[in-house]
Amino acid sequence: MKLRDRLRADFPESSGRRLKQWLESGRVRVNDVVVRRGDVLVAAADRIDLGQPAVMFPAPLRLVHQDEHVLVIEKPAGLLTIATEVERTRTVYRLIRDWLDAQAAGRIFVVHRLDRETSGLLVFARTAAAKHFLQAQFRSRTPERIYVARVEGVVREEEGTLTTRLVEDRAFRVRPARDGRGQEAITRFRVLQRDRDSTLIELTLVTGRRGQLRAQLAARGHPIVGDRAYGSRRDPLGRVGLHAWRLGFVHPGGERIVFESPPPPGLRRSRMGPDRRRPSG
C-alpha cells in the first residue's frame, strides 16, 4: 500500500489537500522516520505517526543561521531590534522570543542592534555565556560589520575615513558635536558605484554608535537616500537606503564565522552604471 492511501484510511475526515500539506511539511513519520512522499510503499505493520505542525519562523525576518550558541537573522527595514517606550511588541527580539517559546527552545539575548530604518544582519546569543563572549568582542571593536548605502550626490573620493564625535540632542537625534563633546565615531568608506545624482558606497564600522552612519554621512553633505530625518530630499526606495550586508565574529566555539546578506535589488540598482564594483569580501 502507498503511504497516501494509508493516510486516507487512517484519517478519513481529512482532504487530499490536507494530507499533501502534512507530507510536505514533514509531519508524517513512518517508524519514526519523516517521509514526505505519498507514493512510498508501507506495510500493514509499519507505524504511521502524525507530528505537531512546525512552528514557522516569523515572516518579516529571515533565519540565516542558528546553533546552540548563536542565532543570526536578517531584519527588514521598518522594524525595531528591541522595545522602546512607544513600541513594545513589534520588535525583532519579541518575534524571535515568541518563536522560541512556542518550541520550548530556550532564550535569546541581545548582543547589538540595528536602527529601525536599517535592514540587514543581526546576531543574538542563545545563552548568557555566549552573550558576554560576543559583547566583549563588540566592545573591543573586533567584529566585522560592513554596510552598503545609497547616498545623495556624487562622492568624489574613492575611499576614506569619517571621524567625528557624536552627541544626542533633545529630540534624541544623533548629530556631530562642535565642541569636542560626545563619543568618538569612526567609519571607513569606499565608493562602489557613482550615478548621476547618487552614490553607492560601502561602509565599515570601526566604532558602532547609535545612528553613526546616518549622522556622519549627512554631516558630509551626502545624506542616505530616503533618510528624511537627516535631510534627504528623495525617497525612491520607500525606505532608508542602508543595509548591513556582512557580519563576522568569533563564535563561542572558537572559530571565526562570517555571514552575508545581499543588499535589496532596489538599493543596488543604477540608472547610469559607471564605476561599477562589487562589495569587498
Image (cartoon, helix red, strand yellow):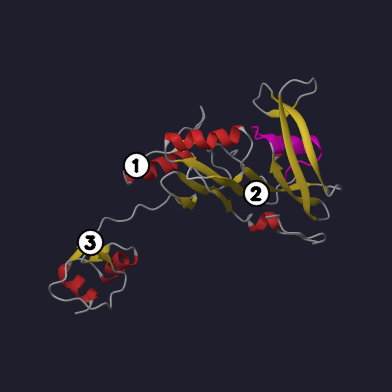
Comes first in the chain, label 3 or label 2 = 3
Q: Which residues are magenta?
A: 207-225
Identify the amino acid type marked 3: Leu
Residue lying at 30% horizontally and 56% vertically, measured from the top left: 53
Q: Relative to residue 253, is residue 279 drawn left or right?
A: right
Give the CA distance from mark 2 to mark 1.
33 Å
Give the CA distance from mark 1 to mark 3.
22 Å
**What residue does disc 1 label?**
101
Q: Secondary structure at mark 3?
A: strand
Residue 121 location (% of width, % of height): 57, 47
Identify the amino acid type marked 2: Gly
Residue 240 in magenta stretch:
no
Asked if 208 appears above or below 177 in the picture, the reply is: below
Residue found farthest to the front: 254
Q: Quadrant of residue 233?
A: top right
Residue 217 in magenta stretch:
yes
Q: Secondary structure at mark 2?
A: loop
Residue lying at 78% horizontally and 37% vertically, measured from the top left: 162
**What residue does disc 2 label?**
238
Residue 108 location (% of width, % of height): 43, 39
Front of the two marks 3 and 2? 3
Check residue 50 in the rendering and tell me which mark sits there, or answer none: 3
User: Dot 3: within a 10 Å radius of its alpha carbon, few (fewer than 14), some, or many (20 or more) residues?
Assistant: some
Residue lying at 48% horizontally and 35% vertically, measured from the top left: 131
Q: Relative to residue 193, is residue 80 drawn left or right?
A: left
